[in-house]
Image (cartoon, rainbow, N blue to C red):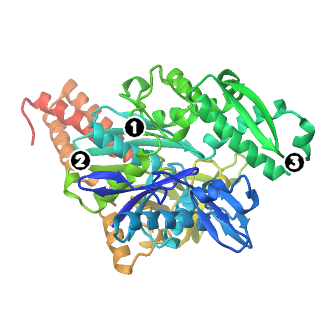
Amino acid sequence: MIVGIDLGTTNSAVAVWKDGEAVLIPNAHGDLLTPSAVSADKDGTIHVGLAARERQSTHPRDTATAFKRFIGTQQTVSLGKRKFDAEELSALVLRQLKADVEAHTGEQVTGAVITVPAYFNDRQRKATRRAGELAGLKVERLVNEPTAAALAYGIATREQEPFLVFDLGGGTFDVSIVEVFEGIVEVRASSGDNRLGGEDFNEKLIELARPRLEPRAKLDKADPLVLHELLRAAAERARRKLSESDDAAFAIVLDGEQLATTVTSRDFEEACAQLLQRLRDPVLRSLRDSNIRVETLSEVVLVGGGTRMPIVRRAITRMFGRFPNATVHPDHAVALGAATQAGLLARDSALDEVRLTDVCPFTLGVDIAEPDGRGGYRSGIFSPIIDRNTAIPTSRVSHYSTLFDNQREVHFGIYQGEAREVSGNVKLGELRVPVPPKPAGHIMVETRFSYDTSGLLEVDVSIPASGVTRNLVILDEADPLTEQQLADRRAALAAIKIHPRDESENAAVLARAGRCYESFIGDRRDEIGRWIGHFESALATQDPRAIREARDQMVAALDAIEGDRYL
């Protein structure tokens, strides 16, 4: 059985595709959400989920939460007598979810679709995959969280117009713009902030309430770690209460004495002004990248526990000039979407007409050097080849040339990110290719990137002057692919290594346009020439959507000028 898992910062959930629908699986406590918490006893016994979270206030040094925020880094925490990194802690949560499903269904779980924030980089995605492997799961696919939510929402509504998924969880914030048409759930753009979530709003509540608690001397003498956990728990309670009323008590019990104050919704909103402002940038970026105007969005769909906060909903209403759609369960949508993706992988008959397309979350490119204006060169400059939010699978090519006379080698670093200087991006690999010695700029270097939905990046560098080629495949080193599976996936990538100009539909339209250009004279010929130029510009972008739109316009124009339909 393949399950869908929402591995969250605060809570996690698991669902399965059964009898034509996604179904959430309860844990041993009968709850649909399992806290993403791990705790250790003095004897080394490990507690996961609710039992661990209940120990957080009393055993803060032996309990870990919100570790999703440092997955993909070297950061570790000590629980009991040993250290854990975020991968291991995540694996313990995933293993618990796996056991809950097996206990509930009586079936063995063999694989999983695991969701990740849309803005997770390559290191974070690989670390999540490794966590799944450590938990005894074959990770069939990683799916962006807002994409999973959109999949669940899109199948339920079958909307034709684009909609925006606004996903504010416990530790991360994601935005995706999605279209559903003819059974295809197409992600047009994704963006986000990996350091913005409900936990940050809790910290603002603590900053707001702590100075009001008395007596201050008792606070100053308290164990800082124990005190912070007490304050964090109080902030979580107060934040939830503020979702229902205009004020809430913020109270802790320290050494048998209660320290309390009252916070209002207005005070909370003012304290969170900067956090609310940070919600705007990913929204604007996704709208720009998708070339979709905000007024054309059919819905703004809320996902994630953080969207329950009235101050967030008011900010969204102001941002979009409309009320958001809160009909999707904010804590369940991502897991249900992951289970739907598992159903797609299993080729369930109920999903025969459904297809999911996703986008590349970060820009992929190489490092180059550029003139510095003083006769030299500035190295370490990022040259994008596949832009973020390009629909995948995709294949794009860029051309470069040698910098120096008699240069004998070109060296490319492969990077992921958005920064102009590669030092601000994530390095994925490198490639060296020999070139024949010629004057500077006389040797052209063709560099092709091909990227698929599983995160496999294939880099091909060729030197037309010498016929030398080099190939590099960048994939998860923990991905348990056999040589045959890798060959199959590379073969699939090879099928898309065709410049759009050479695809049959586009070649046919260009040929027809060329024939028409030769057939007409005067203003008509000039007009056809402009159409050809516009279509060739669209082909140069290598963007399938832009090419399809330009091709349709070209065909319609040629139909009109020739007076009949061309097939």
Q: Is residue 21 left or right of residue 320?
A: left
Furthest-left residue in this view: 564
Where is the C terminus found, in terms of image quarters?
Answer: top left
Label 2 and label 1: CA atoms lie apart by 41 Å
Check disc 2 and report its element: helix, strand or loop: helix
For label 2, count other residues whose C-alpha is less than 10 Å away and answer few (under 14), some (14-19) or many (20+): some
Q: Is residue 277 visible?
A: yes
SS type, badge 1: loop
Vertical arrangement, residue 526 with respect to residue 345, above or below: above
- For mark 3, give the secondary structure: loop
- Tag nearer the camera, 2 or 1: 1
Task: Look at mark 2 in the image and give the residue it sits on.
Answer: 506
Going by the numbered disc 2, the residue's amino acid type is: Asn
Q: Nearer the viewer, mark 1 or mark 3?
A: 3
Read off the residue under disc 3: 222
First in residue order: circle 2 vs circle 1 = 1
Q: Nearer the viewer, residue 50 or 166?
A: 50
**What amino acid type is highlighted by mark number 3?**
Ala
Look at 22% across and 44% down and name the residue there. Answer: 510
Tag on residue 328? 1
Q: Earlier in the sequence, mark 1 or mark 3?
A: 3
The amino acid beneath tag 1 is: Val
Q: Quadrant of the N terminus?
A: bottom left
